[in-house]
Image (tube, rainbow, N blue to C red):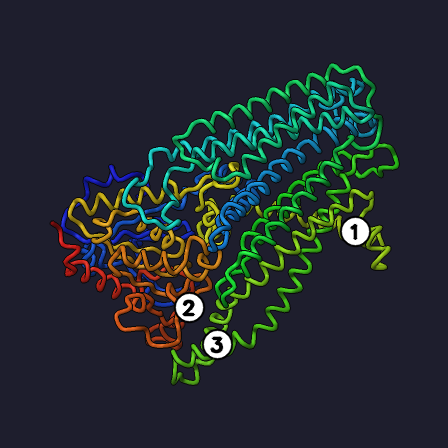
């Protein structure tokens, strides 16, 4: 149904109630969303059971509504190539999400935006330095001077014996091409969404209403120009640092100063959100950023020419001059920015009890994770290429293509972060288990008060499922631990400035043999390589296999929901198409005289929440909302407190006349209540108190007559076939028919 409303208009009739279903992150097929499978299971479970041909397909829907589905699952990925690209762009996506996780407290937006955008800029610099490390440091500077490295590599040996300037200038084409590639990738996806525009009037005043409105492209274009300019400036500075290894000439200094001005200008632009975020109609800033990008390209060309033609002697042997130091200072800068972000978040957090999800450090956690992943990606690339070039020959025999010390410290820091986080996770599981078990036992005792003796094993399974579902809240602590340790791990790379290796430091102060640390780093490097390979395979299977996508694809679908406001190389925001497309379809149906019942499962409920905020009041008055497995309160309100809070949830309810039902289960680890249970009777006339309705899961703990297994534990699975869901549809349809505000004029 995502092919556009024009194809569907011929099938529309007026005066009906249309139930418009929006699936979650599982990427379900249209038949699954509409429950139009040709068969239905009458006994057994998913492993084995009994099915019949459905007898109700030719009949009208018994609930008196016309079913329609919106399928958006292919928008975040769409093809194997796009899905694999998401794996490599994951750090960019995460740091982009961080800017949306700022606290709700006023006065933090500009500072958090600036810090997140600077962190995003450092990722672009790191991306360039990783390619530079392969092309210029490992190959041009080290391998091309080592005969054993060149042996049998005719594709590379043609550059052997050439002047250093020629080698560097020729191989500088590789990082320049990598910059051009990611520049091209970042510009292509947005064009397919240009035809989808949200309404310009009658929007909610809440920030969530801006998600999905097509006004982000001018900002993305400005950010893209700044990042491309910074990327080329980084390449220029590395070349100039290598040229200045034995002393800098006047030309070298002049080019370095000009390049530094380009970098400083980009930083200033990113640190002034009111300037770079200004109206899309203001083209002056577009011209400034485009000029900055063109200047950086020109400077890189001049620098490459200078390196190629300079007759001054070159520094001989060792590492590429200035490269290791540049890396270390980059990691130091990232550490300083993370510390500054943490200080701002802690100082400006809401200090009321329970009012600061993730202790107010959500943006820091996700930004630290993004930095760590980017560092790991870069270090692993350098390590694997170094191993390939070395051919397992010791560096003492003349090849010396080992990775820089900064990357060795990065691998060591990541390994330490993972081990400590796993240790804390084990402690949290053990410590929280009794409390979760007691809560689960109380729920089960209330749902099944007088179970027969044979239901004992099934009751234990239900209690275990509820206890596991309640572990979601404990992930908050683990996320904070991982994010903070990741920042500390990045900080330790500064020890590379002292010329130290992890093994030497650990042996000196912790009395652990240096060989053991070296082995741990090597093992960690291969483990990271295996994990990256797993991500790539996961991307392929997530595209080709729907059940696998249900688990692996969730990170892409959730991360690409938010527009690109920090990193222009992040994957495009599919909400920029999905939300306006839903808005247009709903408006069309209502204007044809229909009432619309919106039904959203899981992340589909988040899409519908943003959609409702963009509907004009005259359209929203003829709309009802049914959500199930919704993460709006449980996850989004915790992670994005400035965009999902009580105010916006109440506004959504008001916009649909409180024709809203939310179904949730205790066994669901993702979905939950929309409005908090205050533990006391709700005030009379409070419509929010009537929204949430709990579903008992499973329906029973004993095997029904004629079956061989008890009813399944559904957890986060959609519940369109559940009796309580059908009842909610009938109720909302009845309210749409009898509410005077939904009567066609």
x and y percentages locating residue 605 in the rendered image = 36, 55
Considering the numbered disc 3 on the image, is that residue within a helix, a strand or a loop? helix
* Towards the viewer: 473 or 725: 473
Give the image quarter of residue 498. Answer: top right
The residue indicated by pointer 3 is 439
The residue indicated by pointer 1 is 519
Q: Quadrant of the N terminus?
A: top left
Answer yes or no: is residue 558 visible: yes
Q: Disc 3 and disc 2: Cα gap in Å?
A: 18 Å
Q: Residues within 10 Å of mark 3 (few under 14, many from 20)?
A: some
Work out whether mark 1 precedes mark 2 in sequence or the reverse, and give the earlier one. 1
The residue indicated by pointer 2 is 713
Work out whether mark 3 precedes mark 2 in sequence or the reverse, and give the earlier one. 3
The residue located at (69%, 48%) in the rendering is 490
Considering the numbered disc 2 on the image, is that residue within a helix, a strand or a loop? loop
Q: Disc 1 and disc 2: Cα gap in Å?
A: 45 Å
């Amino acid at each position: 149904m995502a092919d556009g409303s024009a194809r569907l208009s011929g099938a529309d009739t007026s005066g009906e109630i249309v139930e418009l279903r929006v699936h979650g992150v599982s990427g379900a097929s249209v038949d699954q969303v509409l429950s139009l499978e040709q068969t239905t299971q009458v006994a057994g479970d998913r492993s084995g059971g009994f099915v019949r041909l459905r007898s109700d397909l030719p009949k009208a829907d018994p609930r008196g509504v016309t079913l329609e589905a919106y399928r958006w699952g292919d928008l975040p990925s769409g093809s194997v190539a796009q899905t694999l690209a998401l794996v490599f762009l994951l750090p960019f996506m995460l740091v982009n999400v961080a800017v949306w996780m700022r606290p709700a407290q006023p006065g933090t937006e500009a500072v958090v935006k600036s810090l997140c955008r600077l962190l995003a800029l450092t990722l672009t610099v790191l991306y360039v330095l990783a390619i530079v490390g392969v092309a210029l440091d490992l190959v041009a500077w080290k391998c091309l001077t080592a005969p054993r490295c060149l042996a049998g590599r005719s594709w590379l040996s043609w550059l052997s014996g050439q002047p250093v300037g020629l080698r560097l200038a020729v191989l500088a084409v590789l990082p320049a091409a990598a910059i051009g590639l990611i520049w091209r990738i970042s510009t292509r996806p947005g064009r397919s969404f240009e035809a989808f525009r949200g309404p310009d009037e009658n929007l909610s005043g809440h920030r969530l209403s801006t998600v999905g409105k097509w006004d982000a492209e001018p900002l993305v274009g400005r950010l893209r120009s700044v990042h491309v300019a910074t990327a080329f400036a980084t390449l220029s500075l590395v070349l100039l640092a290598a040229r200045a290894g034995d002393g800098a000439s006047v030309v070298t200094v002049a080019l370095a100063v000009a390049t530094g001005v380009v970098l400083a200008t980009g930083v200033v632009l990113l640190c002034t959100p009111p300037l770079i975020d200004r109206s899309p109609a203001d083209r002056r800033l577009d011209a400034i950023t485009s000029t900055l990008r063109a200047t950086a390209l020109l400077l890189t060309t001049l620098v490459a020419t200078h390196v190629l033609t300079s007759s001054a002697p070159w520094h001989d042997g060792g590492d590429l001059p200035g490269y290791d130091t540049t890396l270390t200072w980059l990691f130091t800068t990232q550490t300083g920015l993370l510390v500054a972000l943490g200080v701002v978040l802690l100082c400006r957090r809401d200090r009321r009890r329970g009012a600061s999800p993730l202790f107010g450090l959500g943006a820091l956690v996700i930004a630290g994770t993004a930095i760590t992943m980017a560092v790991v990606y870069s270090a692993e690339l350098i390590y694997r290429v170094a191993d390939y070039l070395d051919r397992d020959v010791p560096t003492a025999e003349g090849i010396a293509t080992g990775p820089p010390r900064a990357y060795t410290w990065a691998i060591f820091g990541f390994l330490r972060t993972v081990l400590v986080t796993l240790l804390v996770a084990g402690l949290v599981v053990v410590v929280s288990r009794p409390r979760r078990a007691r809560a689960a036992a109380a729920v089960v005792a209330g749902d099944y008060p007088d179970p027969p003796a044979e239901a004992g094993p099934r009751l234990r399974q239900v209690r275990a499922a509820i206890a596991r579902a309640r572990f979601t809240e404990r992930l908050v602590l683990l996320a904070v631990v991982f994010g903070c340790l990741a920042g500390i791990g990045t900080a330790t790379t500064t020890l590379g400035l002292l010329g130290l290796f992890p093994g030497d430091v650990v042996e000196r102060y912790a009395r652990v043999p240096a060989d053991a640390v070296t082995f741990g780093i090597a093992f960690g490097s291969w483990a990271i390589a295996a994990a990256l390979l797993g991500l790539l395979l996961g991307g392929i299977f997530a595209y080709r296999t729907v059940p696998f996508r249900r688990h692996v694809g969730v990170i892409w679908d959730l991360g690409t929901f938010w527009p690109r406001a920090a990193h222009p190389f992040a994957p495009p925001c599919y909400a920029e198409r999905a939300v306006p497309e839903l808005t247009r379809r709903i408006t069309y149906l209502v204007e044809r005289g229909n009432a619309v019942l919106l039904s959203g499962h899981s992340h589909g409920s988040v899409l519908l929440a943003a959609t409702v905020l963009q509907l004009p009041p005259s359209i929203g008055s003829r709309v009802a909302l049914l959500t199930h497995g919704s993460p709006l309160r449980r996850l989004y309100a915790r992670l994005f407190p400035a965009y999902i809070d009580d105010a916006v949830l109440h506004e959504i309810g008001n916009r649909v006349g409180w024709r809203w039902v939310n179904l949730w289960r205790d066994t669901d680890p993702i979905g939950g209540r929309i409005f908090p249970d205050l533990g006391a009777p709700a005030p009379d006339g409070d419509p929010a108190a009537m929204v949430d309705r709990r579903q008992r899961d499973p329906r029973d703990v004993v095997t029904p007559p004629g079956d061989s297994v008890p009813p399944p534990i559904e957890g986060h699975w959609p519940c369109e076939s559940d009796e309580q869901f059908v009842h909610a549809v009938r109720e909302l349809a009845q309210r749409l028919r009898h509410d005077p505000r939904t009567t066609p004029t």
